[in-house]
Amino acid sequence: MSVIPTTGTAAFEPLAETAESISDSRPSQLLTKEDCLEIFNQLYLARYFDIRLIKEKKRGRLRGTLYSSHNQEAILVGALFGLKSTDWISPIHRDMPAFFLKDSKFQWDDPTRSGMSIEEVCAQVWGKVGSPGRARDNWSHIGSKSKRIIHSTSMLAGTIPVAAGVVYADRMNGGDAVVLTFNGEGSTAQGIFHEAVNFAAVHKLPVVTIVENNQWAYGTPVHLGCPTPDVADRAHGYGIPGLVADGQDVFDVYDKVMAAVEHARSGKGPSIVECKTFRAYGHGDHDDDRAMKYRPSDQIEAGRTRDPIAICRQSLIERGFLSGAEAEQYIAERKSASEATNDDFPPAVVDYLNRGIEFALNSPLPDAEEGAMWVFKENA
Amino acid sequence: MAAVAAEPTLVKKNYLTALREALIEEMRRNDQMICQGEDIGMLGGAFGVTEGLLEEFGSTRVIDAPIAEAAIIGTAVGMALNGKTVMAEMQFIDFISCGFDQIVNMMATYHYRTAGEVNLPVVVRGPAGGYGGGALYHSQMNEAWFCHSPGLRVVVPSTPYDAKGLLKAALRDGNPCIFFEIKELYRKNEIAEVLPDEDYIVPLGQAVVRKEGTDITFVSYGQSVYHCMSAAAELEKLGVSAEVIDIRTLVPLDEETIYKSLAKTNRVVVVNEAPMTCGFAGEIVARIANNAFNLLDAPPARVTRLDTPVPWVKPLELHVLPSVEKIVRVALQTAKY
């Protein structure tokens, strides 16, 4: 940004104009076979993380509530895959795999990548000192300034203004970073959602708001929280694009998010990308039994028929990237935690998790005195 | 700007000018600093504290924000997370409630949650206080909400010198701060004073004795300091010598200055214009009771607003807010105990 705009204008002018319409592009068609197989493996990884934690809790090795991302993995993998290392994200409670999937393309174990290691994430899940936040807040409330991951609170949608501020500062510095904020459809009813998206739209900030519409905000169905047919319709009020993606199809998510990301990066402003999906279990594992009652059983069955791993597998077969025995090697789809075994997942995925869990189990609890530390930055 | 500066400038400056100078000087000193708030740019702020900022620093660093306090705070957090220092203006401090979640849950806890990885140099400042006929939503002193949220500095200056020095200190402190400006003092000529030409700060967490005395201690801050000074003058006529302490910052609180005074006077009246229940006056009284009970010859007293909103028309407003007369009355009771 070379020129300080004059009085009465938004702070940032568009960096460039792009010719094509935002929703038409299909960048997933340009992904290589290696890219597509990596995406497939990342889906397994996200699924296995979820299944393994459920198993660990059943074994009594894990405390705390689990917010399962089962059936929603394509949103995380598809949204994150095309980001640059300099981009930021703000995941929420159901997005735990996002912390280690960020910037992980072909480099799951690179300690310098702009994402968390599996060891850090597992240490957080287990509440150990190896957590990036030294286990001071629970579950997904971690982040890392250096890894460009914004720390959430339990007040959902509350990270969107923070995300807008982060990229405002980045644009001031001449950067081209984009931020992806993840939200459920429920939190789009929050006042801060409006305030933050409005601010981002006024200043044409590169904020892509991903709405994981899993149909249920805890025990409340989407039609009691949102009056429009699509949550993405909320975008009309801000004069910004509102895209709808098939949240079960990792490549459709990738296409829509990348269109929004390029739109944002080119200086044209924010977008909302609604990814339609279905919450597989309860709000948290404490809610699994009740969720079987407040949600109609036929809806649950229908919502879980389109497993993202199966849909990705089918795409890869159709594109000739998987064939024969290779295509049928690991069948993880449509299996719950009690049904799935390690044999349903690629060994690299199982090994990766084993390392993370091993680290977490061996990491100590923080010293009790840490509970009273870091209230203020001490300047003395 | 003027090149001629051989003679020191002896112009007295009011509280508002002191604040504006602090912002301008900090913006010049720190090119990573941003100011944002409602009407702070083109208008120069509802009261004029930010006049001239937009013209000098441009609209990227001086943002006329939408009427959206939660977004003003939340985006300030994001900017600070990414390396900026931010002044966020609340047009009236009463409106800060619209940004409450972003302050107490997002901003105040960030350093704690990240085990010290992130610190947020954000100062949320705005005009506060009653006695001006501002009614329910332009008269509040809601500082207690923020003292009750660990992680926030809370500052209430009462003089032009302190307003400038404390605002600069708050902007350099590195912790989020809620900065209460007393709008009835903004243009009060009686308190205008000559400010140093050179850069200075008033460190957070240092109380000051505004008037020395031997019989009773007033502990106060903000506008109430002047009421205590007037009460002290009345008491002097009645043969009671009152010491007046201006605590200046509530968090962190300089307790030592209070106890030092109590060692001399053994009697204390705490005065502020917030409602009594769970107010900061009660906190000061509690700490004195816990830590300096042996110094007391009388029960610690407080004079606060009644537990009511601040009403509009004058007789009602003055009825619920502390008055000099009431402070004198309570002080005499305490002195005679």
Image (cartoon, rainbow, N blue to C red):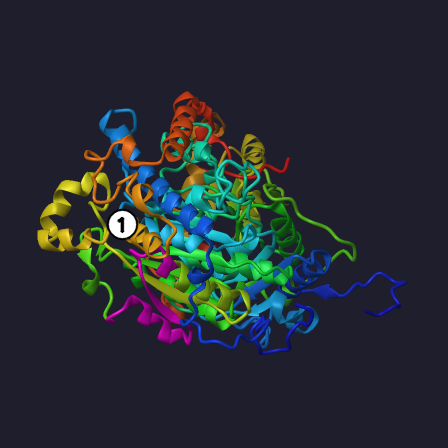
Q: Is residue B42 left or right of residue A253?
A: right
Q: Position of residue B85 (x, y in %)?
A: 61, 54
Q: Position of residue A18 (x, y in %)?
A: 53, 74
Q: Nearer the viewer, residue A95 or B14?
A: A95
Q: Is residue A22 above or below residue B237?
A: below
Where, by quadrant of the figure, is residue B27 drawn?
bottom right
Q: Is residue A151 above or below residue A12?
A: above
Residue B223 visible within the image: no
Q: Nearer the viewer, residue B4 or B282?
A: B4
Element class at badge 1? helix
| Residues in magenta, as a range | A228-253
The residue located at (62%, 44%) in the rendering is B208
The kind of residue tagged 1 is Ala
Residue B291 visible within the image: yes
Q: Is residue B15 above or below residue B211?
A: below
Q: Nearer the viewer, residue A141 or A245?
A: A245
Q: Nearer the viewer, residue B86 or B7?
A: B86
Magenta-colored stretch includes residue A245: yes
The residue located at (33%, 47%) in the rendering is A323
Q: Is residue A230 left or right of residue B209?
A: left
Crowding at mark 1 (Cα within 10 Å: few <14, some 14-19, many 20+): some
Q: How many marks?
A: 1
Judging by the rendered image, the residue that carries numbered circle 1 is: A310
Q: Position of residue A260 (x, y in %)?
A: 45, 65
Magenta-colored stretch includes residue A195: no
The residue located at (32%, 36%) in the rendering is A345
The residue located at (36%, 29%) in the rendering is A126
